[in-house]
Image (cartoon, rainbow, N blue to C red):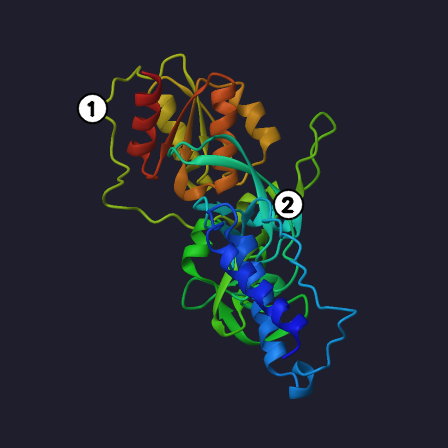
Amino acid sequence: MDAHMTDWLDGLHQRLMDQVPALTLENLGVVAEALRHTALLLTALAEMPAGFWHGAVSPAAPLTLTAPAPTRPPAGHRMVRRLRGGYLPALGVSVPEAAVRRLELAHGDYLATEAIGTFPDGRRKYRFQLAERSPEPPADFRERGELTMAIAEVREQGGLMVRRSADGPLPARITLNAEDVQHLNIAAGDVVDLAYWADDPNDVRVCWVHRTREAESAQTAPIPRSREARPAARRPVVNRDAEDDDGPLDDVAADALAGKRVLVVGCEPKRREYEAAIRRLGGEMEWVEGTEGQVRLEAAIRRVDGVVLLTRFIRHQSFWDATALAKGHGVKVVACPKLGIRSVSRAAVELLA
């Protein structure tokens, strides 16, 4: 073997040995990339014809080994795409679908996060920005499909379904997931986008609800389309719950809410009943839809002493908005998971007593 080639291989061997002692937590990615390049080089050399090793190398032009340029670790936190929204495994934080659409995110993109507060349950609240797009499809990429602008209809057997999307009639009716219907407060007539995995097309989930409403009055700033509410006439029927009864309030003082004004958010079908109960306790009630935007929420919160959020009939974004606005204006707020007259009235009394 040519002496120059022998020297070159000795240099390669020494370089490999030098990489191991220099291994640290900070340079794992750089060393891994260098080893990968070296492995590719060795494989290519092993496949060269025998003549390459005997006299094929010119003494005037010896081979030199050039170390690969160090790779920069990606900025931010890697996002895993879900059927609705995304997830940052490094932080254990969900990324809402609204952020995914606003930033046009894809699986494997890296996000920068900014902590902007805390949710009522103690979880950190973040603002997301794109830090770096994935340069190529990640190894764990899973193809995701969407059906856009589908109209929700009532099924004869109960629940909601869709039969057509913006692309035309669907080959079969799709029943909307009951959890999605409740979580996103979907009603017949709403326009929704559906998502599914290409390798599991039978698992179809609602990933977005398109809200529509008439323009605000000239005195009120327009509400972003993503926060628009739907007409109240489409509210689902509320079933009575034995553990959430509508019995009398005999155990509550008749003037427990005297001089107090309460804002109830959500559950339009029981709006009049809530108002009557709160009036019987000496208070006054205001009400807004559970999909209301920030402008109307803030206007109503400014006029009241306390806010009762009906969590079963309120969109998540409206829940967080109402909570933050109430705290910002020094107004007491409470989440009420039940819909009975007693539950809502007692929640208001305990909040403001």
Q: Is residue 248 left or right of residue 321?
A: left
Q: Secondary structure at mark 2?
A: strand
Question: According to the image, label 1 marks what residue?
Answer: 251
Q: Nearer the viewer, residue 168 or 287?
A: 168
The residue singled out by tag 2 in the image is: 130
- Identified by mark 2, the residue type is Leu
The tag on residue 203 is: none
Residue 331 percent coordinates (x, y): 46, 19
Q: Residue 150, relative to residue 169: is it above or below?
A: above
Residue 23 lies, with reference to residue 308, above or below; the image says below
Is 167 situated above or below 224? below
For residue 149, which quarter of the picture? Answer: bottom right
Q: Can residue 152 be seen?
A: no
Q: Residue at x 62, y 83 (%)?
A: 47
Which one is in front, 36 or 204? Answer: 36
Residue 39: tell me if it is visible.
Answer: yes
In terms of image quadrants, where is residue 138?
A: bottom right
Q: Quadrant of the N terminus?
A: bottom right
Which of the pair 278/219 is nearer the observer? 219
Mark 2 and mark 1: Cα distance apart in space: 54 Å
Where in the figure is residue 44, as x and y percent of width and height?
A: 63, 77
User: Which residue is outermost to the left?
Assistant: 251
Asked if 280 appears above or below 80 in the picture, the reply is: above
* Residue drawn 54% across the image and 19% down it: 302
Q: Position of residue 186 (x, y in %)?
A: 50, 52
Q: Amino acid at mark 1?
A: Asp
Q: Residues within 10 Å of mark 2 (few under 14, many from 20)?
A: some
Q: Secondary structure at mark 1?
A: loop
